[in-house]
Amino acid sequence: MNDMTNSHILVHEFSYLEPRSVGEAIELLVTHGDAARILAGGTDLLVQMKMERQKPAYVIGIGKLTELQGIYQDIDRLTVGALTTIRDLARDTTVREGYTALAEACAAFSTAQVQAMGTVGGNLCNGSPASDTAPALIALGAEVVLVGPEGETRSPLERFFRGPGKTARRPDQLLTAVEVPFPVAQAGSAFVKVGRVAADIAKANAAVYIVCDGDRITDCRLAFGSVAPTPMRAPRAEAILRGQMMTSELIAQAAAVAAEEISPIDDVRSTAAYRRQVVAALTVDGMNRAWERAANGESANLRMGEWLEHDEGRTTKDASRITHHASRTTHHAPRITHHEITLTVNGIPRRLHVADNDLLLNVLREDLELTGTKYGCGIGECSACTVLMDGKPVLACLVLAAAADGSHIRTVEGLAAPDGTLDPLQEAFIEHAALQCGFCTPGMLMTAKDLLETTPHPTEADVRDHLRGNMCRCTGYAAIVRAVLAAAETMTKDQ
């Protein structure tokens, strides 16, 4: 029988290094090589470390390198910094209007918490065959920018993946950006996905990029995930479509060929036979959606938005800062020692001494005695430990305390006013009987609070989508949804 892993803690000891620039991150990678791992969002690496599948001697935290964050539209390309979160991509107007497949892939990505924590660079460097962003970016013709001791190199994303968990990135390189070419006129794109549940990784997913000229397909790219050892294109299916008149019969033919081109396996999420059927269906759906967008001028809308920016006296955003590598002092926390961090928790400054492998969840519960944030699965699947960090929902079980240094944290204890008056959301949960055993309630409240702060007038669909990562074994969610909607109405009236 296998030994059980305690997912509430990080047993493994390591040195946490926090470079202050890309240049210093590269120096650390050169120095430590295979003994080091990059920590961006942490939603994959920390899970692997908790499960003792990875045991790096050094963890290099790059999450505070602002030069790697941001979305920039240049004259001929979209540049996305590697630390740009999935959530920011899903919500960006430029991405939604001109690179719709990417926005849809990010919106379908896991949970609200993982979207807020996960980064596009981390998602690609994980090398997962089931990645959602990879097929969308491949279909859109993206390149990755890698920086190493010899300088920058660029590579088409479709050649970046080498196998499950393997990429072309060398141990001494850092992925700094993803560049997507500006779509040509009459281009459209779409992303579609099938999973076991809404928050699960894909059984299969598909991205389509299509260019039309009247009723003719002049160019197209089809990309798929979770159906081969790496995210992949379907060149034979693409060849059938190019230069042909768009018909339902042509789409069906291409879909059948795509289903034969993939190389799926049987695993715990699906069977190979089912994946082939799903890919055929996803190809049809994706083609129809992308064609409609191409015919309606998806890329033309983006270009008009770009010219409007110039007309209003603004220029396109400058992407050069993503590749600016200023030198600053590296923060080095030696292994097996405690070091000082500062957090502002529920409005109160806190100075704490933590070890490199201390988790934010443990610090909140054990050092600060804020036990409202619950221990659950410990690997980011239940969301019982959700707190707001710098205004965004995060999984406290997957945040290193050292990496949170300088952050503002809000826990469920911080929802009520200082005089004890409950937040309207808390009142609504009581009024609508949205809690039973109460274990999941703090995480639900913090996730719902994020929704109401970013979407003041949510629909039922909005509420269900935002809470899809919060597990509840008692209520069946109906009362929770009613409570959140009621709180939204109350808060709107109070404003």
Image (cartoon, rainbow, N blue to C red):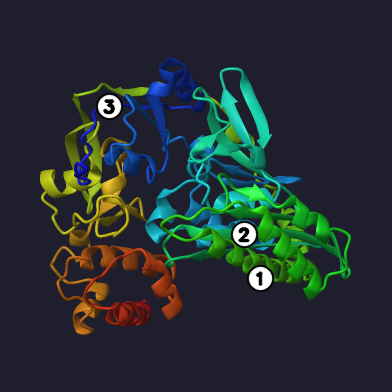
Nearer to us in this view, 439 or 309: 439
Res 91 seen here: no
- Pointer 1 local density, CA inside 10 Å: few below 14, some 14–19, many at least 20: some
Residue at left offset 21%, top offset 60%: 414
Which amino acid, mark 3?
Answer: Phe
Image coords of residue 7 (percent x, y): 22, 46
Mark sitting on residue 14: 3
Res 345 seen here: yes
Q: Which residue matches tag 2?
A: 206
Q: Are marks 1 and 2 in contact (CB under 8 Å)?
A: yes
The answer to which of marks 3 and 2 sits earlier in the sequence is 3
Image coords of residue 322 (percent x, y): 58, 35
Residue at left offset 41%, top offset 18%: 32
Q: Quadrant of residue 477?
A: bottom left
State the separation of the CA atoms marked 3 and 2.
39 Å
Which amino acid, mark 2?
Answer: Ala
